[in-house]
Image (cartoon, helix red, strand yellow):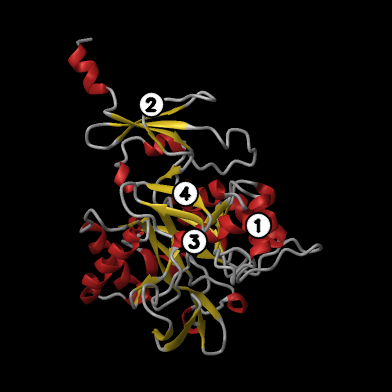
Amino acid sequence: MALSRLAALLPMRWLSNVRLPQAQRCSHGANQRWRIGLDDDDLISLVEPLPAGSRAAGDDWHGDWLSPAGVDLQINGGLGLAFPELTPTDLPQLEALLELLWRDGVEAICPTLVTCGVAPLRQALAVLAEARAAHQPGRCQLLGAHLEGPFLEPSRRGAHPAQHLAAPSLTALMERIDGFESDIDLVTLAPELEGAGAVITALAERGIVVSLGHSAATEAQSHAAFAAGVTMLTHAFNAMPNMDRRAPGPVAAAALRGDVAIGLIADGVHVAPTMAVLLQRLAPEQVVLVSDALAPYGLGEGQHRWDERLLIVADGSCRLEDGTLAGVTLPLLEGVRRLARWTGEPARAIAAATVLPRRVLGDDRSLDQMLLGMPLAESLRWQEGPAGLSWQRPGAEVTP
């Protein structure tokens, strides 16, 4: 091979002493150091392990972690926008929200549509499709939507409006998603409801991930749902039975099975820190962080509107007037920082918001393969210091 051609294939510069966040149950290899080769466009062109004790040349990262940016599978809106209420006039505000999410370290979201009427749902899906087609650099990407409802157990509906809940049926499903199947990535439902089995099958046949949530499912019903094609839990421990010594419920069933993703809101309110720590220790390769952020995300605390209802925001939590916990206003990566502080396992916390959500949506590549071809400026560099975990886009200022 000619020397000029060989030189064109070699990385132009190197990052050395880098760690990659892993979520494996086994700690073997957790401290493996890597070197990252960058081409002349600062695209990641090579990811290779370093032998123990190596002093390879390059920019020394001193053991900082390199990851893709965040992927949020459950976010309900922001900057005053609630996704189920979107109209075409909201497109500029939606673009501003996507820019905010990018600045907050989030690469992509499944915009979540909580239970609402059929017409608003279909209109929101159409607006999201238009915004998705207009994606530009510097904005968070819109993945397929997450329909959280309407096939929910009424006694576990939480903040979902009762008047828009529906019994599961193929007719009710197609009334909502016909023509938008390719615009939907995830559906949350209560699998124990009569008629849910046919809906789960129909969704799985269309390549749509089905998640158990707002459900009263027993352990046995949960196992049956997983066998039928349910592959995730929506906000574990919330709007579902708790893990009891005589009634293990959905969370225990998912952890025991080992291949069901377990969505977790790591704000310290939806799930107590101790329970979050125990859950990640029990199922480190299954815990997927979500924000569950609502329309006031990016705005100040106080009172905000949510459809016809009032939301009260305090300390990052959103509640209805009756005290019902509805969601948060915290960024996804704040959940990473909190989970890392509680567990003392920063690598697992990082993976839970950056790598494992991609697994839920079908990306089975190893992390080093995910990084290949990625612009370095679109990745995240994570550092651990006296104030805990912090992140930055490489070349930018550290974000606490």
SS at mark 4 in the image: strand
Position of the N terminus, as image quadrant, is top left
SS at mark 1 in the image: helix
**Image side of residue 195 versus residue 363, left or right:** right
Question: Which of the 4 image quarters holds residue 236?
Answer: bottom right
Q: Amino acid at mark 1?
A: Val
Q: Position of residue 199 (x, y in %)?
A: 50, 61
Q: Amino acid at mark 2?
A: Ala
Q: Compute the Cα span from label 1 to label 2.
A: 38 Å
Q: Which of disc 3 and disc 2 is earlier in sequence?
A: 2
Above or below for 299 versus 35: below
Position of the C terminus, as image quadrant, is bottom left
Disc 1 target residue: 277
- Residue at left offset 29%, top offset 42%: 375
Circles 2 and 3: CB atoms closer than 8 Å: no
SS at mark 3 in the image: loop
Q: Amino acid at mark 4?
A: Gln
SS at mark 2 in the image: loop
**Image side of residue 87 versus residue 109, left or right:** left
Q: Amino acid at mark 3?
A: Val
Q: 165 or 381, which lies in front?
A: 381
Q: Which of disc 2 and disc 4 is earlier in sequence?
A: 2
Above or below for 192 versus 371: below
Q: Which of disc 1 and disc 3 is earlier in sequence?
A: 1
- Residue at left offset 51%, top offset 50%: 384
User: How many C-alpha atoms fall within 10 Å of the one at disc 4: few (<14), some, or many (≥20)?
Assistant: many
Whether residue 245 is visible:
yes
Disc 4 target residue: 383
Residue depth check, mark 3 versus mark 1: number of the one nearer the observer: 1
Disc 3 target residue: 290
